[in-house]
Image (cartoon, coloured by chain):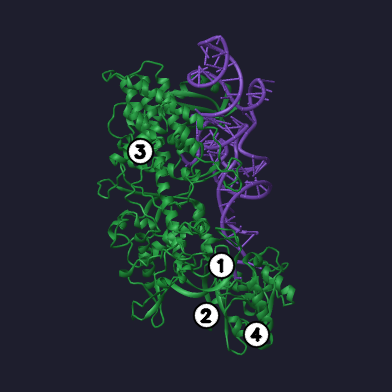
Chain colours: A green, B purple
Amino acid sequence: MNYSKEIDKKWQKKWKEEGIYKYSHNSSKPKFYTMEMFPYPSGASLHLGHWFNFSPADSFARYKHMSGYNVFHPMGFDAFGLPAENYAIKTGISPKESTEKNIETMKRQLEEMGVNYDWDYSLQTCKPDYYKWTQWIFTKLYEGGLAYKKNSLVNWCSGCKTVLANEQVIDGECERCGTPVERKKMEQWFFKTTAYAEELLTGLDKLEDWPDLTKKIQTNWIGKSEGAEIVFKSVNNNFEITAFTTRLDTVSGVSYVVIAPENDLVEKITTNEQMDEVKKYVEATSRLTDIERMAEGKEKTGVFTGAYVINPVNNETVPVWIADYVLDNYGTGCVMAVPAHDERDYEFASKYNLPIREVIVSEDGESKPLPFVEYGKLANSGKYNGLKSKEAIRIIASDLEKIGQGRLTVNYKLKDWSISRQRYWGAPIPIINCPKCGAVAVPEKDLPVLLPDNVEFKPDGVSPLKKSKEFINCKCPKCGEPAEREAETLDTFVCSSWYQLRYPNPKDTEKAFDKDLINKMCPVDVYVGGKEHASMHLIYSRFMTKALRDLGYLKFDEPFKKLIHQGLILGPDGNKMSKSKGNTVSPDIYIDKYGSDVFRMYLMFGFDFTKGGPWSDKGVDSMSKYFERIEKLVERVQNAKNDSEKSLSQRDKQLLRVKNQTIKAMGNDIDKFKFNTAIARSMELLNEINDYLKEDVNEKVLKDTVEDYLRLLSPMAPHFTEELWSSLGHNSSIYNEEWPKIKESELSGGTKEIPVQINGKLKFVVSVDADLPADKILEEIKANDDVKKLYDEYDIKKEIYVPGKIYNLVAVRK
RNA sequence: GCCGAUGUGGCGAAAUUGGUAUACGCACAGCACUCAAAAUGCUGCGGGAAACCAUGUGGGUUCGAGUCCCACCAUCGGCACCA
């Protein structure tokens, strides 16, 4: 075979010299913005996952380019983050240095893949010319009331020595290092994602081209629940407790009220007699990690506060308890406990001998074993007796509203996004804390707040930036008095929540993005990336888009119109690839042996793009053989004479028909990221062409077909087809060829087979002229000898003819 | 526990959305070329002698079901003391 890695190199060089992938916003063609989630620049060479993600996405972009779009397909680097910092701690090489080096390596390797990126439209989140604008966005959100600081309970990872967002806590462990997460109270910056909870949820309905699974995950994550608030006043009328409940119908069964140990009310309401015990309990729970606290089967614990409140619905006095089965960060952190109709309350009440009163029975009035948690009919509920649960909720809520002690409301699991990180390698939060003026945003003219180079950043829980006096000490931009800078850095997800807005104009020193341009370019038409970001990056980006829209910068609601998740290539053993399991596979040996295109094609053909699967290289050889067969065919065509005068034979027409079918099918497939079937179609076309070569060949038909065939393959195998294209005497790149147009006239003709069935079971097929109108086809079927025989053998009860498709007889054998 | 996805040959997988199940490959077998092998090319390839039977299992709707409906089994994923 002629194709090899050397051919890749030759064309990569030429493409670069000729600048064929240079992008310009000035074009008469319609825009098409497609991008992949940008990678983190890690030290090692590109792994299989990168290839599986980026090379098909590149093929897609190439296909769109050939289909007449002005395709914008940028690539950048998500360059801030912990790995570089941890690497630095280990080796002493600064994050800046190692990151820059890694980016250079990665860029080179991406080019070896044969991608059509224009590096003039690229970005690196760790560069001041980028993070200046991340900081600017922060200040805009701050001014718009969407960023705020509060003392709050946060997820603390003692491994990474930093705070984590809720989204970064997986099963109670740090998403990055697996350390059990602790809870800590700290002053933290937040973005007000909750302000958009409802829109983030309802907006999902409009995202028709997003995977259902991803929308489902976001729906769960947002966790909307409709219920009611109810206010319990204390017996002495010196405090109030507001609880959220979805089961206001059970309110007459409240036998106590519980609040979370961390809740601010605890201190306020606890009586002196109970204070010691309560303090002990609160301290004990605070020592537990989330995992310990929520361990399955863990017995519920709690303690009485000494306080009593009044149930506004029946005026009963009930005790107030503290228990760690109540979460402070959901609802109000306070719960009305109805042991008869809630499993948790039942367990707790049983343990502490609190009353259990049945107030819901089944709809037919039957008493059910407790705890009975389904909807039913009210009992033991005074004037509400006999009401069905759902109407009771409405009526009780409206009664409470009249006395100002409750109302229907909604609650979301979604929390505000915690964005402060006590680490070094990130964008400094652009805030100056002035003793007089408070937190003041750094004015645009003073941005970026540069990340200092020489800082000791060994993690010890104190933000490394605090240790740099030069960094910390500054003047308040408002009053000019001495002040201190915020010492924390932004969660890297802030950097990636807006990067698609920067790509179209990455070198702009005046603004983050050009309003007019970005409103034309966005939303991104197709976004490709892993589904592990469903409840992180993809929520943050959506939030940021909506926030910037409401601040007047954007005119669209969603960042990404269509979303595709690539699957995961697993190790040969079916497990996730990891160095510790020793099941990693490097793409390099395949690239060296076969060249980039064979490998790209193999990845696309051997796996469903959205599914992935366990790695196997069984078919790589056969892909290489496919390339050889193509080379042979092209060699044959190089000597093709031009016999255009010849009229088309039936065989010629059949070839053209198959070609047109292939064009149609491959286009549809690539649009849906179904590269496996697209390549299968191309193989069918090759088989057809080789079959055609056995008979009388019309050289012009052959050459046209083969050239179209190369065009069809070129998005998937850019180097290989470029080489063959030039061997056919073409001087311009195949990349700038048009994707072949379907000729309807050539699509028709030939014969087609109509299945003939008895009772839905296939008997045989009848071949008919494909161009015949449906009723003529039916005539031909009926005239067919085999069909006539069926009439003799069977009693025909009914005849079903789906025009031009199938002929079925409902019949009994005579 | 709640929500969701998937299940088709020895294997990776197709099936225009209710209309010829197993496309395209891999593996395998036979033949040709060769002294021979490799490479290449051709042929076959779900089961069954056949009628027929086969898309995780059992029902249902339909002239017709891999596709729609109900129940179940298995695997994977998301959420999970969310009041």
Residue denoted by label 2: A401
x and y, in percent, of residue A165 in the image: 51, 65
Residue denoted by label 1: A156
Q: Name the residue type under label 2.
A: Glu
Q: From mark 1 to mark 3, how far is it between C-alphas?
A: 47 Å
* Up/down of A229 relative to B55, above or below: below
Q: From mark 1 to mark 4, how far is it between C-alphas?
A: 34 Å
Q: From mark 2 to mark 4, how far is it between C-alphas?
A: 22 Å
Kindly identify which numbered label has been placed on residue A12.
Answer: 3
* Up/down of A206 relative to A617, above or below: below
Give a yes or no on whether discs 1 and 3 share a subunit. Answer: yes
Quarter holding residue A571: top right
Q: Name the residue type under label 3.
A: Gln
The chain to which mark 3 is attached is A
Mark 1 secondary-structure assignment: strand
x and y, in percent, of residue A459 in the image: 53, 65
Give a yes or no on whether discs 2 and 3 share a subunit. Answer: yes
Residue denoted by label 4: A308
Q: In which quarter of the image is the N terminus of chain A?
A: top left
**Nearest to N terminus: mark 2 or mark 3:** 3
Give a yes or no on whether discs 4 and 3 share a subunit. Answer: yes
Crowding at label 1, few (<14), some or many (≥20) Cα neighbours within 10 Å?
A: many
Depth-wise, is mark 2 or mark 4 nearer the camera?
A: 4
Crowding at label 2, few (<14), some or many (≥20) Cα neighbours within 10 Å?
A: some
The chain to which mark 2 is attached is A
Give a yes or no on whether discs 1 and 2 share a subunit. Answer: yes
Mark 4 secondary-structure assignment: strand
Q: Pointers 1 and 2 in contact (CB under 8 A)?
A: no
Q: Name the residue type under label 1.
A: Trp
